[in-house]
Every structure is written in structure tokens, then in C-alpha cells.
Image (cartoon, grey):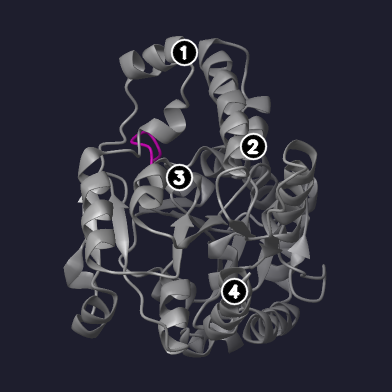
Amino acid sequence: MDSLTTGLMLEGHRVKVLTLHTYKHPFDPDALSADYQESTRIEAVYADTELNLRDAASHIVTGESYHLSRFHVPEMDRAVERVLREEMFDVVLLESIFTSSYIPAIRRLSDAEVVLRAHNVEHLLWEEVTSNMPKGPKKWLLSLFQAKLRDEEIRLLGVVDAVAAITDRDASWFRETAARHFKRKSVPVVSLPFGLDVENTPHSAMNHGPERVLHLGSMDWTPNVQGVSWLRDEVWPLVRSAMPHAELDLAGRHMPDDWVSTPETGVRVLGEVEDARATYDAPYIVVVPLHAGSGMRIKLAEALAAGRPVVTTSKGMEGMALVNEEHVLVANTADEVASALTRLLNDAAFAVELGARGRAWALENLGHRARAKSLTNHLSQWVQA
């Protein structure tokens, strides 16, 4: 979201940012430059999104999507209405389905084009997550909410003016679904991957052979928990069997309390790191062990931008036109991932070459200004239509 905001401003557009912040993603104005705050006139509204079983149960009765209702707060409704009374906009960009509940307030006060920036096809993500869960009340409840998310994503296609999806796969789902359910309404759908400031990403360690393995990702996201649990419990013992001194670092916010370092297995739990970009600028192999989720993996993109050699699953690299053995190593089974990690730890020259090719790909494909210019071209067409 920050990359797109920055890119739009670099392209000369006037941008106003209204954002929700939560206990998982707090708003810290001190982390933003004064110029950025002045240019975006950013405002943040708090939403209490902590899971509440009583609220979840009530949504079963009402038929509403609990996933979405957690992000709707009256304070944001009032902020949207105030801003739209004070200013006129050509486009209102909704970052993800979780901001879609504010569409009625937007429509009441603005003739702007309402564009959904779809970070995922959310119901497909949760469908994959629940498929890996054991049978029980939690799986039943999440399956029910996943079905409500699907209904909401379909309904939205009849409400928004256009969709900018992060991957070709996601764009295809929105395009095909819109054609099937809204034959009388043509909903423009484009694929627009996210961008990064690749040129200024620290990469001083890219010429050093890897010494350790790293997973960096938020551990309050179920696909990450599932993937890292599999990495720790099934993949890593195979790596240690082949290389008894290999070491694995697990970093990210909201690390489970019972996840602790175990020196005897070579696993070190770092928890939340102060600077992700600085963490990647170290002699690591970065592993992305995802088996669920749609959209693009920002952490994978950041690792490529830093010139790190990467081992990922096929699911982990969805949305990026990466080539196995050229930009990353792709492995899907525990044996394959373990073999890829040991290969890179044993062959420093190949690991350095792989990281360099990955960074070259990121430089060519992930620049945030180019992504913003692509979006601008589409927005201009939609506004004029």
C-alpha cells in the first residue's frame, strides 16, 4: 500500500490516505517522515479486530461476514464522510475487501470511481487454510465464514467500478466471476502486481555465501503458522541429518509463546525484528514454505530485492514470473526443501549467483513507480469511460 501511495505521488497525483490500524498493525506516526505525512495527509482510525467468539456466533445467525464486520467502525464512516464533504476525488481506491463496508458512505457523497485493490481472493485463501486443518469446531466455523466471504466477493463485483488484482490468477477469478454473475455490467479487471523501492533496498551481503537459513514473516497469519510449523517439524530435521551444524532463524512479529530457541536442533527464535530490510541484508538463505494463500508474497519480493538466495514452494512464488534454478529454487515436499537448503549451504558460489539473478529480476519487475504508472493508465481510462 505504501509503495502504491508513493508511486502515485511520484507520478504527480494528489493523494489522501485514510487507514485503519489494529492491535496487530498499530499506527506509528514517528515511523513516517514529515514530508510523507504532509503529502498524504494520512489519518488513522483504530478498529478492534480481535476475535470474539460471541460476536462470531452472532454472525452465524445474522448471515453477515464476520471477517468483514470486524473492520467496520463508526469512526471511519465519519472520517470518510468528512473528507468527502471537504474534497472532490476522481478515484477512491479500496485497499482489500476489508475496506468495502465503507462503500455506502462513499457513494452517498462522491461520484468518484470506486476501485477495489484486491490483495487476495480472500475466500480461496481461507478455503486452502481450512483444508489443512483437522476436523473440529474451528474448521467448521472457518469453513462457514469462508463461504460468506465468497458470497461477499461476488457481491462486490456488482458494486465496485473496477478491480485491480495483485496476480494474473486472482484477476482471472474476478473476471470470470463477474462475467458469470453480472452479465449486464462490464467490470474492468486488471492484474497489477505490487512494487518495491528495489534500487534502494540494502544488498551489501549479496556477494557473501549463506551461513544460515531464515524465515521472516508475521506469525499471526494462519498460512505462515502452518508453513513454518511444517518447516520446523518436518523439513529441518532432514537438513540437520545431512548437515548437523546447520542453523535456522525464525523471525517475525507475534511469535507463539511456546516457540522457543532449541540450540540442540539449531533453531533460533528471534521474534520481531526492528528492521526487516536490514535483516535480509545478511548472509541468509530465505525460505518461503507456504502451502496456502493467494496474492503475492511481499517477503519473497523483499528477499529477492536484497539479493538473497531463496527456496520457495510453488504456492509461495505465485504471482511472480520466477524461474526455478534461475531466480529461486522451487521445492514442495519436505525432502525437496531440505535438499534445496543443503545444496545452497554447501555451494556458496551457486547461492551467490542465484541471489544476484533474483535481484536482477526484482530490479526489472518490481519498481514501484512503474507499477503506479500502470495503475494510473488504467484509472485514467476508467474515469473517462
Q: Would you say residue 233 is visible in this rendering? A: no
Q: Would you say residue 241 is visible in this rendering? A: yes
State left or right for residue 14 relative to residue 298. left
Q: CA distance from mark 1 to mark 4?
A: 42 Å
Image marks 1 and 3: residues in contact by CB distance under 8 Å? no
Residue 256 covered by magenta stretch: yes
User: Which residue is pictured at 63% across the width and 61% down the height?
Assistant: 166
User: Which residue is pictured at 38% across the width and 32% down the height?
Assistant: 69
Residue 297 rendering spot, x and y as whole percentages: 59, 59
Check disc 4 and give the amino acid type: Gln
Q: Earlier in the sequence, mark 1 or mark 2?
A: 1
Disc 2 element: helix
Q: Earlier in the sequence, mark 3 or mark 4?
A: 3
Check disc 3 and give the amino acid type: Ser
- Residue extent of the magenta highlight: 255-259
Q: Nearer the viewer, mark 3 or mark 4?
A: 4
Q: From what the image shows, is residue 198 above or below residue 107?
A: below
Residue 137 rendering spot, x and y as whole percentages: 52, 10
Name the residue beneath numbered marker 2.
Answer: 154
Q: CA distance from mark 1 to mark 2?
A: 19 Å
Name the residue beneath numbered marker 1.
Answer: 60
Q: Which mark is residue 100?
A: 3
Check disc 2 and give the amino acid type: Ile
Image marks 2 and 3: residues in contact by CB distance under 8 Å? no
Image marks 4 and 2: residues in contact by CB distance under 8 Å? no
User: Which residue is pictured at 46% across the width and 13% down the height?
Assistant: 60
Name the residue beneath numbered marker 4.
Answer: 384
Of residues 58 and 49, which is closer to you in this image? 58
Disc 3 element: helix
